[in-house]
Image: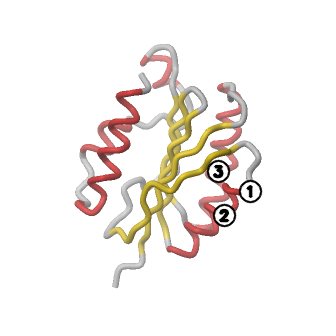
Amino acid sequence: MNNLFALVYLSNATTAFSEEELKDILTVSRSNNSQERVSGVLIYCDGNILQVLEGSKESVYKTYDKIKKDPRHTDLIILQSRDISERNFEDWSMGFRASTKSEFEELEGYLDLRKQVENNRDDSMNQVKTLLVDFINNNR
């Protein structure tokens, strides 16, 4: 029986985040999500947030409900929510736009999203993969 679930949402940040603020968010998110056994990825670019949450349905919605109450988010839209056969992002990771690729790779929590998304074997997440690739390509 499959008990994994994924939710993808889009939101706007209420203010622009600095690199330091993003690192702080990453640290807190990793801790909270580890406790809930939620994995995923958060992409931040110019005030736009795209996030994938994975785990049990209960844990994913519990995490999403916290996010909805977070004053740093506005205009949340669920793009997809569905059962999945395997996790697409084993570790909680965050990507965001940096001025050069080498600077981006030096950031704590760097994840090569293009490779992660394109190499995933779970066909049920094809729409999410397409969404992530489009988001990455449009926010370079």
Q: Which residue is mark 1?
A: 69
- What count of labels does the image hold? 3
Q: Residues within 10 Å of mark 2 (few under 14, many from 20)?
A: few
* Residue mark closest to the camera, 3 vs 1: 1
**Which quadrant: the N terminus?**
bottom left
* Residue mark closest to the camera, 2 vs 3: 2
Residue at the spot x=47%, y=53% of the render?
52
Q: Disc 1 residue type?
A: Lys
Residue at the spot x=66%, y=63% of the render?
65
Q: Disc 2 residue type?
A: Asp
Q: Earlier in the sequence, mark 3 or mark 1?
A: 3
Q: Residue placed farthest to the top in the image?
A: 100
Closest to the observer, 135 or 104: 135
Q: Disc 3 residue type?
A: Ser
Residue at the spot x=52%, y=20% of the render?
98
Q: Residues within 10 Å of mark 3 (few under 14, many from 20)?
A: some
The label shown at residue 65 is 2
Q: Are marks 1 and 2 in contact (CB under 8 Å)?
A: yes
Measuring from the top left, give residue 43's x and y in whole percent.
51, 38
Q: Residues within 10 Å of mark 1 (few under 14, many from 20)?
A: few
From the viewer's perspective, is 47 left or right of 114? right
Closest to the observer, 71 or 31: 71
The alpha-carbon separation of the residues under discs 2 and 3 comes to 14 Å
The alpha-carbon separation of the residues under discs 3 and 1 comes to 15 Å
Q: Which residue is mark 3?
A: 29
Look at the numbered disc 3 and give the secondary structure of its residue.
Answer: helix
| Quarter of the image where one finds residue 23 | top right
Residue at the spot x=27%, y=63% of the render?
124
